[in-house]
Image (cartoon, rainbow, N blue to C red):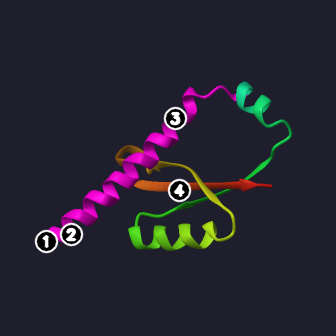
Amino acid sequence: MKSVSRSVFGASLFVMGCAAGGVAHNYVSTARAAEAAPGQRWAYHCFKDDSVDSIQETANAIGREGWEMASSSLSGGANMSSPIWCFKRKW
């Protein structure tokens, strides 16, 4: 029971951190980001999943290909229950 609680707590903390990162882009000036890296281009890979094991497996697989976590958010209408995970890499 204790390990299940830790797992749930860890997964919840991870999701909250990712959600906070998804909101943070609202507070960053796009103009400043463009000045810092002129001509830099990104490719994005997003997927929808809510299974912790599946998310970890996918994240590890694409991480080996150079993708890094960019953001996550919830979708799914009124109940907002389907997480979308987005990764980016230099193009």
Identity of the amino acid at label 3?
Answer: Ala
From the viewer's perspective, is 41 left or right of 65?
Answer: right
Between disc 4 and disc 2, whose residue precedes? 2
Name the front one of labels 3 and 4.
Answer: 3
Q: Nearer the viewer, mark 4 or mark 2?
A: 2
Q: Nearer the viewer, residue 65 or 78?
A: 65
Kindly identify the residue that appears in the image at 46 percent across and 72 percent down: 54
How many labels were placed on the picture? 4
Q: Position of residue 82 (x, y in %)?
A: 43, 56
Q: CA distance from mark 4 to mark 1?
A: 29 Å
Residue located 49% across and 42% down the image: 21
16 to 56, vertically: above or below: above
Q: Label 1's element?
A: loop
Above or below 1: residue 69: above
Q: Which residue is mark 4?
A: 85
Q: Please name the residue that numbered disc 2 is placed on.
A: 4
Secondary structure of residue under mark 4: strand
Report the span colored magenta.
1-30
Q: Amino acid at mark 4?
A: Trp
Mark 3–mark 4 Cα distance, whole angstroms, equals: 15 Å
- Which residue is the site of mark 1? 1
**Is there CB contact under 8 Å for labels 1 and 2?**
yes
Which tag, 1 or 3, sits closer to the chain's start? 1
Residue 77 at what x, y percent from top left? 43, 46
Secondary structure, magenta segment, majority class: helix
Q: What is the x, y in percent for residue 26?
A: 56, 30
* Residue 28 lies within the magenta run: yes
Q: CA distance from mark 4 to mark 2?
A: 24 Å
